[in-house]
Amino acid sequence: MILEGRILRGRSFEPVEGRVIVEEGEIAGIEETETDSEGIILPAFVNAHTHIGDSIAKEAGEGLSLAELVAPPDGLKHRLLDAAERSELIAGMEQSISYMESAGTAVFVEFREGGVDGVTAIREALSGHDIDSVVLGRETEDAMLESDGFGASGANDATFDRLRKATAEAEKLFGIHAGEVDSSDINPALDLDPDFLVHMTHPEPLHLERLADSQIPVVACPRSNITTNVGMPPIRELLDRTTVGLGTDNVFLNSPSMFREMAFTAKLFDVSTREVLQMATINGAEIAGLNCGLVEDGRDGALLVLDGESANLTGAEDIARAVVRRAGVDDVERVVYPADSR
C-alpha cells in the first residue's frame, strides 16, 4: 500500500511531501519526493479513555452533578445501563465504534462496565470492525482476566489493592480515575502504582511532584471535565512532568471525536500544536503499550488521510495547526488500519 501527500512525520509532525509505504501491517518506508496529492497523512488517533456503553443515552442528565451522573452504583449512567436490554447496549456501542472509525481513530481504551458480560458485549459490538481496542474490565477480577486489564472507578469508591496485584500478576494494564472532583483520591491512586491515571483535574503540588518522580502517565479529558463542571485539568503542568494522553470519556456526555478534543485542548490550554498531536496519537499509544501513533518506519500502519483540498482545509498555511484546530470528520478521506495491508 502506498499513500501520497503531505506527511506529518515523526514526533515533530513536521510536514514533508512524499510517500508512505505500508507492508504487512507496518510502515516499511517513507520517501520524500514530489507528488500530485494534496492529501494530509498523519497517524490515526488513539482515544485513550472512553466509556461507550452509555451510547444509548446521549445528552441525558442535564443539570446533574458528576456523582449523580456517573457514580457507582446508583448514578444515572448505571441505572440506564442496568435497565437497558443487552441488544440495545450492543447496538449503541456499535454505532459509537462506527463513528470513531469514520473520525480517524485507530484505537480506543475502554473502561468497560458490566463485569464479564460487559466485556463480552463490547467484543460482540467490535465484531466486523477494523478499529482496535484496549478493553479494561471493571467490577470483578474475572472481568479483568477476560479483557486487556482493569479500569478502576476511583480510590475513594473501593479498595483496589487486591485487583491491582492480580492485574500485575496477569501482566495486564491497570488504569484508575483520580482527582476528578477533588484531590482526596489522588495519593491513594498513586500508591497503587497504576499504569496510568485518568482526569487529574485537581492535583496539588505534592501530587505533581509524585507524578514527576514516578512518571505515571495521565489521560486528560477536558471536554468531559467542563461538561460535568468539575474544573479543568492543569494540562501544562501535567505535560511538564509526565506523559499525557487525550480521551473523550463518556459518550453520553461528549461525542467520541478526537478532532473536537484536540481543538478544545489547543484553544483553552497553554500547549503547542505538536504537543496536542502527541497527546492524541503517540502518547495514548505509549500509555496503552501499542506500536502505532507515529508516521515512522517500523510503526503499525494505522494512518489517517485528510483531504487537504476540502473547503475547510484548503489554503491552510500551517498544516499541523490546521489539523489540530479546524479539521473534522468531513475532512477524512481515508482511515488505514494495519489489517488493510496484510
Image (cartoon, rainbow, N blue to C red):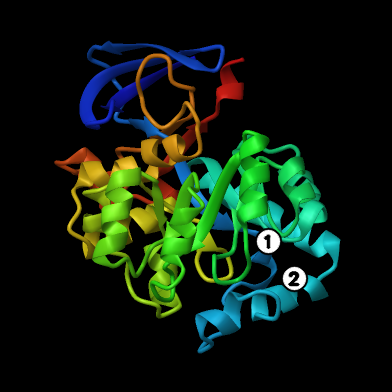
Q: Residue at x 45, y 40 (%)?
A: 287
Q: Residue furthest bottom?
A: 63
The quadrant of the image that shows the C terminus is: top right
Residue 233 quadrant: bottom left
Mark 2: secondary structure: helix
Q: Secondary structure at mark 1?
A: helix
Residue at 66%, 36% in the rendered image: 169
Neighbor class of circle 1 (other Cα within 10 Å; few <14, some 14-19, many 20+) is many
Amino acid on which disc 1 is placed = Gly
Look at mark 1 in the image and give the residue it sits on: 53
Q: Nearer the viewer, residue 243 or 291?
A: 243
- Residue annotated with mark 2: 81
Residue shown at 22% from the left, 57% from the top: 237
**Residue 185 at what x, y percent from top left?**
46, 68
Q: Is residue 279 above or below residue 251?
A: above
Would you say 74 lies left or right of 267 here?
A: right
Q: Are marks 2 and 1 in contact (CB under 8 Å)?
A: yes
- The quarter holding residue 5 reads top left
Residue placed most toward the observer, 99 or 228: 228
Within 10 Å of disc 2 (Cα), the crowding (few <14, some 14-19, many 20+) is some
**Residue 270 in view of the camera:** yes
Q: CA distance from mark 2 to mark 1?
A: 8 Å
Out of 46 and 208, give the one closest to the viewer. 208
Q: Position of residue 285 (x, y in %)?
A: 45, 36
First of labels 2, 1 by sequence position:
1
User: Residue 316, percent across and down?
Assistant: 19, 44
How many tags in the picture? 2
Q: Amino acid at mark 2?
A: Leu
Q: Position of residue 193 (x, y in %)?
A: 48, 48
Circle on res. 200: none
139 w.r.t. 280: above or below? below
Whether residue 97 is visible: no
